[in-house]
Amino acid sequence: MSGPSDYQPSNPALQWIERRLPILGLVHSSFVVYPTPRNLNYWWTFGAILSFMLGMQILTGVILAMHYTPHADLAFKSVELIVRDVNYGWLLRNMHACGASMFFFAVYVHMLRGLYYGSYKEPREVLWILGVIIYLLMMATGFMGYVLPWGQMSFWGATVITNLFSAIPYFGESIVTLLWGGYSVGNPTLNRFFSLHYLLPFLIAGVVVLHVWALHVAGQNNPDGVEPKTEKDTVPFTPHATIKDGFGVACFLLLYAWFIFYMPNYLGDADNYIPANPGVTPPHIVPEWYYLPFYAILRSIPNKLAGVIAMFSAIIILCFLPWLDSARTRSSKYRPLAKQFFWIFVAVCILLGYLGAQPPEGIYVIAGRVLTVCYFAYFLIVLPLLSKIEKPRPVPNSISEAILAKTGGKSTPMVSTAIVLALSGALFAASVDKARAEEGGTKPPGNSWSFAGPFGKYDRGALQRGLKVYKEVCSNCHGLSLIAFRNLGDPGGPGYSAAQVAAFASEYKIKDGPNDQGEMFERPGRAADYFPSPFPNEQAARAANGGAAPPDLSLITKARSYGRGFPMFLIDFFSQYQEQGPDYVAAVLQGFEDKVPEGVTIPEGSYYNKYFPGHAIKMPKPLSDGQVTFDDGSPTTVAQYAKDVTTFLMWTAEPHMEARKRLGFQVFIFLIIFAFLMYFTKKKVWADSH
Amino acid sequence: MTTASSADHPTRRDFLFVATGAAAAVGGAAALWPFISQMNPDASTIAAGAPIEVDLSPVAEGQDIKVFWRGKPIYISHRTKKQIDEARAVNVASLPDPQSDEARVKSGHDQWLVVIGICTHLGCIPIAHEGNYDGFFCPCHGSQYDSSGRIRQGPAPANLAVPPYTFVSDTKIQIG
């Protein structure tokens, strides 16, 4: 991409093509002989990681679109059916959903790397601005993709974000109606979001081509920020950069696979496992983590229009970065002050992200305002000022000189600053979170679940007992609409034989029809039928239950959660703790108390539950000792019932969990071996170049 | 520059490169499988393809019904004596796809012809009781089937397929 190539293939057929379309020469000059600075560090591999993630998202997305139904009544269920019924559907969905987070994680690293090493400075301004455009397109794509599962967060996220445009004076309302294709977020909105979500990634790919083109014209920046002068300063792209990028991707895959196979819901919101309900807003609307800093900026401004402007400005301001920072020295490595402020800026972004996830009240609002000012001050005051007053350290004459001068201690100040900042940030966040936990409710006690951890499996006995509890107790009011009788015989489930499943199904009366006379009729259930709902419709469910419709239980253990608080949610990432839902469900089942504590008032028709948010639950105490008999001699206590039925409901929410963890283990073995091989290959390839 | 100075440990280096390349190839190929496998029918489609039962008692002689199994139309014809005789009078060896009528129906239930109503040429649905052979006529490209569903004329290469089915009772069959 950096000019005409003199590449001549040796194969006559390729020569024939090359004379007519010099595509091999283009590839050769851009990705083989292309000179790449020899001092690039691993932060530079994120470009390749991002290309890989874009390809991954397009590939998995195209496949998910083969199975997804973009209709307001069917979208939620179609996503669940992908996960449950399509071969490897759970894998593809996890790859796509976690892939979005990984994509954003990589892009943030990539952007901060550009910021730290001054990669936006002359002559790379256009390259940088193209990057900002890609980032904006990514945000739009990610937002619309999040709407597609049509859960509660999808729906209300769509409502809140599209309403941003209503802040525009005079035309706001008409623009929002135009975006919706109706008077509220609805089926037309979902349809167009699906269409655009499919389109935008290809636009991103197009801008990525421009981005790479601009990169190959200007040449890559490098950690020392001095342009390559002689051939000694560079190495050919292939094999050096290729293998190094490959190793970077392999390491990144380990992180990606950790999420896909072990923590698929860690970054998601439990509310999105509740189908969209236009009548009820979740108590706590939060965007996906990658939008949180901007969401915090939006909320910290008390004026609607000003908030929206501030939020968009926070991104657009990046376009002006090349002119706001006019310092001649590129790399922060040689800018002692800029380096410190860079890490403060990183801390500000992380803290803004934390605040974006907190309720907009009290200290959060004040902290949000302070940090918003800090965010903009970095661009508008700190960087312009530093360009004037900072005295940079001497920059090496060339890249080879920089490599020769390389000493061990150079990165210490940067790292220590980061650690100090992270610690202070952590302490601040922890103290803030403590204040919140006290006003909250009682947190559910932890349990030791057989399905927890990387090798977790469902306890077959518990699944079968849980099914019995569900059938005899819960199913009087709660549906299990996503589970078919055939699932009871699926591998990784309760483990019934086909004959047992058929016998179980035939005990149910299933409404079918119309028959030849046009009438509906009842017939015995078959394996392919789904558990029938106890009520014909939601209104009937409400009427029979004092106004509160009993929720469907298929996904209940994934649709319920509770905040783990600041230090815990980081520890959970490593310990793979993700049983908030089961812990909560088991706690609620056992949390009924006859004696209402002082200061709590329970309205008529509600019951006191220690663990239910607000403590007033419409469901009466469902389980009592001895209510359900077990054949296997397990104790017939409420504690046992609660544990068994929760295990069963974890299986209904995640029927392929055992396959997921098993495949995950195999993938990890492979990836670790592969990463080591890549590492040693990289070392060999680079052996002559250091 | 990488290949030039490989004199010291040529074999070890080559082995490493081959091993890494092989691991990448194996990993890539294994990763491809879920992307291909997802195209196959999903579990709910397979479950919905379970056997169905059809009550034959309302179908009078000379009539036929069309039922669907696995998304395919199944013709169930209650054949007349004339149709059966015609089907059996033919010299089997002279047929494009030789098969006797007896082999295409269940013995003792000779009046019932059960065939998948999909033309073996290119998948159109033939019309019953049309054509020159008292059987089926495909409007797409003019294939003609007789009263046993055997191809007699036109571009179709084979007889209409007989789905797996059994008689549960004299008036009820199970398809699948």
Image (cartoon, helix red, strand yellow):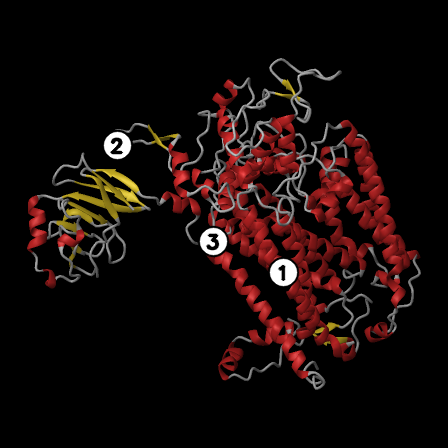
- Dot 1 and dot 2 residues touching (CB under 8 Å): no
Q: In x, y percent, where is residue A679?
A: 70, 68
Total of numbered circles in the picture? 3
- Chain of the residue that carries numbered disc 1 in the rendered image: A
Which amino acid, by three-letter code, is at mark 1?
Ile
* B141, above or below B61, in the image: below
Q: Are marks 3 and 2 on the same chain?
A: no
Q: In x, y percent, where is residue A526?
A: 37, 37
| Quarter of the rendering containing residue B50 | top left
Depth-wise, is mark 1 or mark 2 nearer the camera? 1
Numbered mark located on residue A214 in the image: none
Considering the numbered disc 2 on the image, is that residue within a helix, a strand or a loop? loop
In the picture of the structure, the residue carrying the numbered disc 1 is A669
Which amino acid, by three-letter code, is at mark 2?
Asp
In the picture of the structure, the residue carrying the numbered disc 2 is A516
Q: In x, y percent, where is residue A690?
A: 79, 76
Numbered mark located on residue B38 in the image: 3
| Quarter of the rendering containing residue B67 | top left
Which amino acid, by three-letter code, is at mark 3?
Gln
